[in-house]
Image: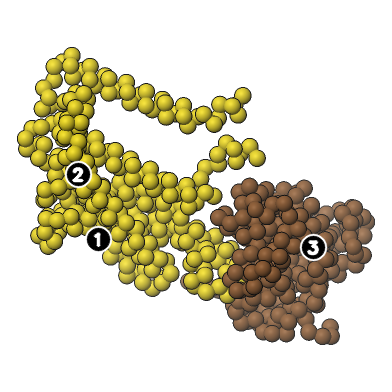
Amino acid sequence: MTFETMPSAPVHRALKLILTLALLIAAWELVCRALEIPVFLIPAPSQVAWRLYEKRDLYLLHTWITLYETTAGFLLAVVFGIVSAAIIVVIPRLRDVVMPLLLVAQLVPKVAIAPLLLIWFGYGLFPKILVAFLVAFFPIVVNGASGLASVQPELLDLGSSLQASRWQTFWKFRIPSALPELFSGMKIAVTLAIIGAIIGEFVGGNRGLGYLIIVANQELDTPLAFAAIFLLSAAGIALYAVIELFERMLIPWHAPATPAAAAT
Amino acid sequence: MPGTAAIEVVDLGKTYMTADAGIPALEQLNFRVAPGEFVSVLGPSGCGKTTLMRIVAGLTAPTSGAVAVDGVPVSGPQRKIGLVFQVPALMQWRSALGNVLLPTEILGLERTASRKRAHELLELVGLAEFAARYPRELSGGMQQRVGIARALVHDPAILLLDEPFSALDIMTRNQLNTELMRIWSERRKTSLLITHSIPEAVYLSDRVIVLGPRPARILDIVAVALPRPREPAMRVSLSFLQIVDRIGRLIGLEYV
């Protein structure tokens, strides 16, 4: 009985979620119409949807820009984050220097330095990528380092008894052991990277969803702002989903047991 | 004892240094293990048994005295030792076969021959059909068998087992005792088993080195004059129980 219902459980959950969202949106629409709320205060979902449809080319372009900045910043953070984490774990002497530096760097509010980056690097995409990188870097280093250090001590003993080289220990034991924590760091990092890109766009420039929100605010075009926020959330969910997909592919041993696996 | 001992421990001592004092763990240990012999080291929990094993394996340096394996002084990690730990310590991301193959990869041994050997060993430990399974799909006892196969795959001169069955339930434990006995009989690998189970030590060993509480000194080395091959039924024979009782009295336990 339970076996028959289990495989459809995710579908059920998705349906419930969609239904709940649909109800919320319907309620929002009704309230806006019933109370005749002015569009510039809170637009009804139908007005936002119309706006999205009307200016779809514009939105597509700006969404693409923001996605590009986010992804570039995030990927840079992944590369530099993993390398830094590896250095911290493998060379303990460097850890005492690097860790406090990283901490201090993390305590500097990135929003505060975004305008400076503009002065240094201009109004192009690069300063936005840089802010995205800066905010995404820290969780990857911290989770990566803690993951790389999480190897079972017995495995390290086994490695040293076989006189494994540093590289072998790193590649065969540390990297696979680190993957679960590294991925949770990357999931946090990607949501931060979007925020970073938006901050960059807020501060200056003439492209991206962040820029669109600023323009919409200045013109009191609230449906435009709502539509941009909607697209931002969608982009965030999509990026998160991509990372989760990679996680499932790369660390199947860590994935929660599926009903099929539990039955064997 | 004539000839070269497989393991020779001479005046071995280990003191752990803390901020203000040295805590002695091992004192004045002397013993020899002959090639092909199965010897257990038995003592109360926390008496330094694991420290002894780590020193023999070359993972920890002694404070005084010396250890030689096959007549060669131990000065660091050595590849001629196979290690089995208290926990299976398997890599979750590798199949049983992949786990067994790990030492051969680290040592850079030839692949085809290594795979063949790994398959043979999985068969030896009764897991031939589970080669492709991942650790999370195996029971605790099966995981520990994979650990034993892994320890043997590079054909080490000596097998060091650090309380390999202490995390298992008593039924699985007895079953694996019998398995280990069979594996040892087939391979005749010099084995040093660390344990705190007296029946386990007596059942498996040619001799049992009995350690006292911290700092560990050798209370006695008890020869187990039971014939081989040993059957599980022997565990309730009078001569078996007499040896168990004798060791129990040595460490202050009264079994009978």
Q: What is the quadrant of residue A146 in the picture?
A: bottom left
**Image label count:** 3
As measured in the structure, the alpha-carbon distance from the residue carrying label 1 to the one carrying label 2 is: 33 Å
Give the residue type that dot 2 points to. Answer: Leu
Residue drawn at 48 percent across, 71 percent down: A167
- Quick check: can you spot residue B51? no
As drawn, the chain in brown is: B
Please name which of the two marks, 2 or 3, marks the residue nearer to the observer. 2
Residue labelled with disc 2: A61
Query: Where residue B75 sits in the image (x, y, percent)?
Result: 61, 82
Q: Chain of mark 1?
A: A
The foreground one among B71 and B97 is B97
Residue drawn at 33 percent across, 45 percent down: A239
Asked whether the residues under the numbered discs 1 and 2 touch, taking CB atoms below 8 Å apart as contact, a structural biologist would say no
Labels 1 and 3 in the same subunit = no
- Judge left or right: residue B13 versus residue A107: right
Q: Secondary structure at mark 2?
A: helix
Looking at this rendering, what residue extends furthest in the left direction? A219
Residue labelled with disc 3: B183
Q: Name the disc covering residue A105, or none.
A: 1
Please name which of the two marks, 1 or 2, marks the residue nearer to the observer. 2
Q: Considering the image in quadrants, where does the C terminus of chain A appear?
A: top right
As drawn, the chain in yellow is: A
As measured in the structure, the alpha-carbon distance from the residue carrying label 2 to the one carrying label 3 is: 68 Å
Q: Name the disc covering residue B52, or none.
A: none
Give the residue type that dot 1 points to. Answer: Ala
- Judge left or right: residue A158 versus residue B151: left
Q: Chain of mark 2?
A: A
Tell me: residue B109, above or below residue B119: below
Labels 1 and 2 in the same subunit = yes
Residue drawn at 60 percent across, 74 percent down: B108
